[in-house]
Image: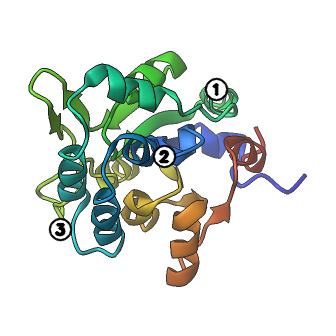
Amino acid sequence: MPEALLTDDDLARTSVFLDFDGTVTVADTGVHVLERLAPAEWRAIGDAYRRGEIGSRECLLDEWSLLPRDEALVRAAIDEVALDPGARPLVEALHAAGAEVTIVSDGFGIRVAEVAADLGVEVLSNRVDWEAWRLEFPHEDRCCPCSTCGTCKQAPLKDARHRGQRTVLVGDGASDRKAALLADVVFAKGSLAQWCELTDVRHHEFERLADVHRALGL
């Protein structure tokens, strides 16, 4: 077994931030629901976001407008995506070690709060007002230099560091890039790992959360 990245003492002073789509879940729920229910135009919107031409808030709003106004249908598609089976063991081990755990999500925000409550962790996420059929962004940060994200993932990392915490980010996509620039330890997979390689951001690759669990020596 490789040497653990953090000691028990480190973990007791650590804040761990878990992305939701494609990290806590085995696939991106937003991509899944768009593939199932939206016309093909959503792909160009997502590509523009990944190229940095638009922010995540604009991307999400434009994609949301393409989905059918049917809550039951959308929720059913979201529920088709399974959770990573390593999520609960990882969270329980982190809590036992004294670490703080937060899910930070910059997707549509469907199902995130329920999963976070079931795992017993804090959550920062966008959310849907189903009655008005609109997205809400309670954790955007218009004081951030970019100010274009739905959920600012840098803000909670900055807050944790100001409290003297070490920070760990676990993510997989474009919404995790800015947080990866700040985190003390980065676990990356998918397009985030590719971006970290291209931009020389130190990171540890993983495929499933069980890999993160082992790497932290829990």
| Front-lying residue, 101 or 85 | 85
Read off the residue under disc 2: 28
Direction top: furthest residue: 118
The residue under label 1 is which amino acid type? Arg
- Residue beneath the point at 55% across and 38% down: 24
Dot 2 lies on which element? loop
Read off the residue under disc 3: 145
- Which numbered disc flags the more N-terminal residue, 1 or 3? 1
Q: Which mark is residue 88?
A: 1
Residue 184: x %, y % from top left: 52, 60
Q: Nearer the viewer, mark 2 or mark 1?
A: 2
Above or below, 130 against 145 in this view is above
| Front-lying residue, 217 or 50 | 50
Residue 55: x %, y % from top left: 22, 63
- Which numbered disc flags the more N-terminal residue, 3 or 2? 2
Above or below, 141 against 128 in this view is below
